[in-house]
Image (cartoon, rainbow, N blue to C red):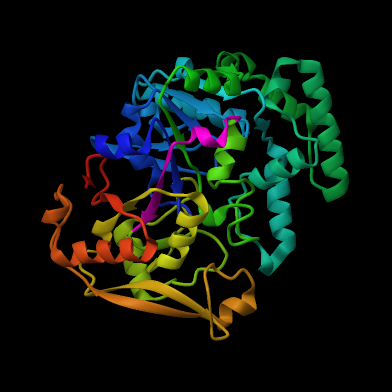
Amino acid sequence: MKNILKNLGPNIAIIGTQWGDEGKGKLVDAISQNFDIICRSTGGANAGHTIVTDGKKFIFHLLPSGLLHEKTIGVIGNGTVVNISDVVEEIEALEKLGLEIIPRVKLSLKAHLLFDYHKKIDAELERRKGSKKLGTTHRGIGPAYEDKIARIGIRVEDLLDKELLKEKIKNNCDFHSETLGIECNADEEFENIIKFQEKIKPILYDTQKFLNDSIAQNKKILFEGAQAHHLDIDHGTYPFVTSSSVCAGGIATGLGIAPKKISGIIGIAKAYTTRVGEGPFPSELDNERGENIRKIGVEYGATTGRPRRCGWFDAVVVKNAVEQNGIDTINLTKLDVLTGQTEIKIATKYMLNHKEIFTVPTTRKANEKLNIEYEACPGWTEDISKVRKFEDLPVNAQNYIKKIEQLIGIPVEVIGVGMDREDLIFR
């Protein structure tokens, strides 16, 4: 692994290439001991990274999952939206497991706060959409970003001025109650957040200054992605996307660092494809085989518990993410889940109206007309969970990976073969 990291440079980003849930947290955990700082740049607590180590399961939502290593510092950047009660709850849960968290977390003063009224707005907007709902997590992420863009958002720094905070909460509650008719109690919102003020004060920080100073001091930084490229607000399958820029470009804006400071990018791709919620999914297996993959892979959301839709590996989707993010290498996760499949397919080409297209169509009619070309690969039955060298994998598993490399144009250098942090093959 050290050779891979050396080739990528000191400041590495990890980005999901599909629709999230690829297993980014596991790789972050496996390599974060090689870094001084782990950063989250976008998104909110709707992201969930699950780490399994020594039989213990750790679920991270907003805190960087690299905090499992006792010497790392975790940064939550200005591009995130933060529910303070969730952050405190997450910190306390990890502290109960014996981890010292508070001294090692730095939360940007410029991050935006998420309130209970954002969750109510989320649920109400979904209700009004009826059959055309987006399938959000109802965690209030989208409405919090809407307030930010509308320039009525409330930032973490406002926690330091009680009078201003109370005034801003009242103004927003009045506005949203009037426009959407939701029940919004400004006094309750204020009391619910201000009680965490003293607990949260020690982690409030000018994270942009901290990160740029750290880069100047040659500290090693890992940028931990949330969600995935095809959920990006601009480049994903709009409108079935998240509300922030989760692609490589979002790292720079979400943390306040120069793009050229990112020295290398690792893409995470599941050995098959999954998606939570609504939206187009060209290679979906809406049948018994898809259900079988879901059961074996335990494909349920870490944050919501929602069942994930499952399908074959889609090389068009992953190659698109590789090209737009400048990804250098791939970590292919959950290869073991495909053990026992007699035949494994890979989506290799999209044809629409007899013309090849290179991204997932975002309109319903186009998806209905989309023709997908597949390449079939023979499967394997051998247990691969204890394999630690690529050459020891079954030949058919090796060939499957080689075919993926050929289709996406970059090497697969890390392979996941089980749930535990040690279940990885480094080529």
Identify whether 132 is placed above or below 343. above
Q: Nearer the viewer, residue 95 or 254?
A: 254
| Image position, residue 239 (x, y; %) | 65, 60
Q: Nearer the viewer, residue 329 or 116?
A: 329
Return the x and y of residue 165 as percentages of the image width and height. Answer: 77, 22
Q: Which of the 4 image quarters holds residue 37?
A: top left
Which residue lies at the image location 63% right of the left edge and 52% below the top edge? 233
Is 158 on the left-hand or right-hand side of 178?
left
Q: Which residues are magenta?
A: 256-270
**Outermost bottom residue:** 354
Q: Residue at x 40, y 73 (%)?
A: 348
Residue 261 painted magenta: yes
In the rendering, at what x and y percent does residue 18 appear? Answer: 46, 57
Evaluate whether residue 44 shows in this view: no
Note whether 241 is above or below 381 in the view shown. above
Q: Position of residue 302 (x, y in %)?
A: 44, 46
Asked whether residue 200 is in view, the answer is yes
Query: Is residue 403 magenta-colored?
Result: no
- Image quarter of residue 401: bottom left
| 28 displayed left or right of 123 | left
